[in-house]
Image (spheres, rainbow, N blue to C red):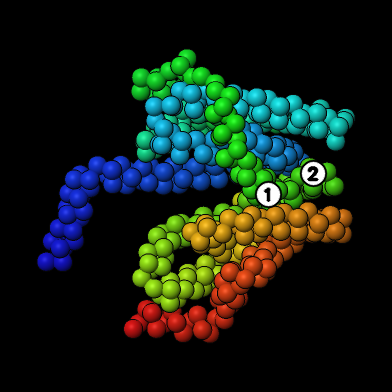
């Protein structure tokens, strides 16, 4: 009977999906994106481990330094226009050719300028290191080529994630197969970096094929100066917001590359990668619970804040499920995954893993602030974190090396989350809610009542 009931419910949901094409489209889109995320994670992890072991800490460090260094210029490529392109395509679908043409030239010109600046800066900062120049040059090419990726926004606006995911998967497979071949042939670092570029090249090639197949044409794209001004005036705040986020996330590896050496960056990078391995779980939790949280606001403020407190409790304590084991077994984890060459990163991992707590809470806090239309507060958190990160790295890296960078990351991630909201009267109560989540006796008691009542 129970089996029949479950089957009946599944058939009922399936029937509802087919009766509502838009809902069916969304469900299939989410399914494709979820599958893509899992595949990307698994393939990148497995091949990434092989690449790290093959290159060793110095070359692996140089590669990660170059990725971090070039990413600092990322927010200025396209001037944030691509971030609002989907919205424009949905609102003005008939203007797609002028939207694409205008965005393409903005992206291509700013990408080319950014690439030139990256190459000039790396020559000035590392004048005798031509390997660093060529690695940065190859990664910077990706920002110019990305201008040709605009048709993916066309499929995104039509909620056709299948096409986007297939293109990403193709790029992922070709790129990682090339890395494996180059490793087996004992090729040098620059070939591994070139293989990474093929991810973008293959992805864009497939997107263009699908775009032409959809009876669209690149040759119809037109540039409109007036539209360019309007798009840039709408998107410029995203440039600064994006810059703060990138500095927040990447500046530690860049500063290590200049203040220490590539070997140290390699050790630090593996610690960062492991500490971020399970962070997507709190991200998925926040995506799942947030719609319910938003709906509860319409019921009553009391229920809304009660549920918000429960979500903060969950996001505070859930990371401990992987932070604690990683803290105690950090050396063993590093040895098993990366080998004895990276063993010195064990202690660094035991420090930086605690940044997962702030990252977890930030997932839901960002969604809450966006829902409450408190974008200035959100920007202030990123700005505060970025400035704190830079200052602490300048102080702690000379004293403690990569362990100092790890400590700077933990503090600069945690401090803004738990103190920034105190500066604004409208969010002060949220700061108290976050602090309240550390009361494990209360959290355990309420969780027990919720589960067994």
In terms of sequence position, does the residue under pointer 1 or pointer 2 come before the other? 1
- Between residues 85 and 361, which one lies in front from this camera angle? 85
Please tell me whether mark 2 sits on a helix, a strand or a loop: helix
- Neighbor class of circle 1 (other Cα within 10 Å; few <14, some 14-19, many 20+) is many
- Between residues 339 and 313, which one lies in front from this camera angle? 313
Q: Is residue 126 left or right of residue 370?
A: right
How far apart are the alpha carbons under marks 1 and 2? 20 Å
Quadrant showing the C terminus? bottom left
Quadrant showing the N terminus? bottom left
The disc label shown at residue 244, or none: 1
Q: Is residue 383 left or right of residue 446?
A: right
Q: Looking at the image, which residue is at 65% across and 24% down?
A: 109
Residue under numbered circle 2: 257
Q: Residue furthest front?
A: 226
- Between residues 394 and 1, which one lies in front from this camera angle? 394
The mark lying in front, picked from 1 and 2, is: 1
- Between residues 130 and 160, which one lies in front from this camera angle? 160
Q: Is residue 136 above or below residue 270?
A: above
């Amino acid at each position: 009977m129970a089996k029949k009931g479950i089957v009946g419910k599944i058939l009922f949901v399936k029937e509802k999906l087919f009766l509502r094409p838009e809902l069916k489209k969304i469900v299939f889109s989410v399914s494709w994106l979820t599958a893509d995320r899992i595949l990307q994670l698994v393939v990148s992890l497995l091949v990434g481990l092989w690449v790290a072991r093959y290159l060793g800490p110095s070359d692996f460090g140089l590669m990660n330094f170059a990725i971090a260094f070039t990413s600092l210029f990322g927010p200025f490529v396209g001037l944030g226009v691509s971030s609002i392109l989907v919205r424009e395509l949905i609102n003005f679908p008939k203007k797609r050719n002028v939207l694409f043409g205008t965005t393409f030239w903005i992206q291509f010109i700013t990408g080319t300028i950014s690439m030139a600046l990256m190459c000039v800066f790396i020559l000035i900062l590392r004048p005798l290191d031509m390997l660093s120049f060529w690695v940065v040059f190859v990664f910077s090419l990706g920002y110019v080529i990305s201008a040709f990726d605009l048709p993916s926004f066309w499929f995104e606006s039509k909620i056709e994630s299948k096409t986007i995911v297939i293109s990403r998967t193709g790029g992922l497979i070709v790129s990682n197969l090339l890395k494996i071949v180059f490793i087996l042939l004992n090729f040098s670092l620059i070939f591994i970096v070139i293989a990474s570029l093929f991810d973008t090249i293959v992805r864009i090639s497939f997107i263009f094929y699908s775009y032409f197949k959809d009876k669209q044409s690149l040759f119809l794209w037109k540039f409109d100066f007036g539209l360019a001004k309007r798009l840039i005036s709408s998107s410029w705040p995203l440039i600064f917001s994006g810059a703060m986020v990138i500095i927040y996330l990447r500046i530690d590896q860049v500063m290590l590359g200049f203040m220490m050496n590539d070997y140290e960056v390699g050790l630090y990078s593996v610690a960062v990668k492991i500490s971020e391995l399970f962070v997507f779980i709190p991200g998925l939790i926040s995506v799942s619970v947030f719609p319910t949280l938003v709906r509860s606001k319409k019921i009553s403020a009391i229920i809304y804040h009660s549920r918000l407190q429960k979500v903060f409790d969950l996001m505070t304590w859930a990371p401990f499920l992987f932070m604690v084991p990683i803290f105690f077994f950090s050396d063993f984890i590093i040895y098993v995954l990366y080998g004895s060459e990276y063993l010195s990163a064990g202690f660094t991992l035991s420090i930086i893993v605690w940044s997962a707590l702030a990252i977890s809470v930030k997932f839901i806090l960002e969604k809450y602030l966006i829902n409450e239309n408190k974008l200035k507060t959100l920007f202030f958190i990123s700005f505060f974190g970025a400035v704190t990160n830079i200052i602490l790295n300048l102080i702690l890296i000379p004293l403690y090396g990569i362990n100092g960078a790890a400590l700077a990351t933990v503090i600069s991630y945690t401090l803004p989350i738990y103190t920034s909201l105190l500066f604004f009267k409208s969010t002060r109560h949220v700061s108290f809610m976050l602090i309240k989540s550390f009361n494990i006796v209360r959290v355990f008691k309420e969780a027990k009542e919720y589960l067994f009542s």
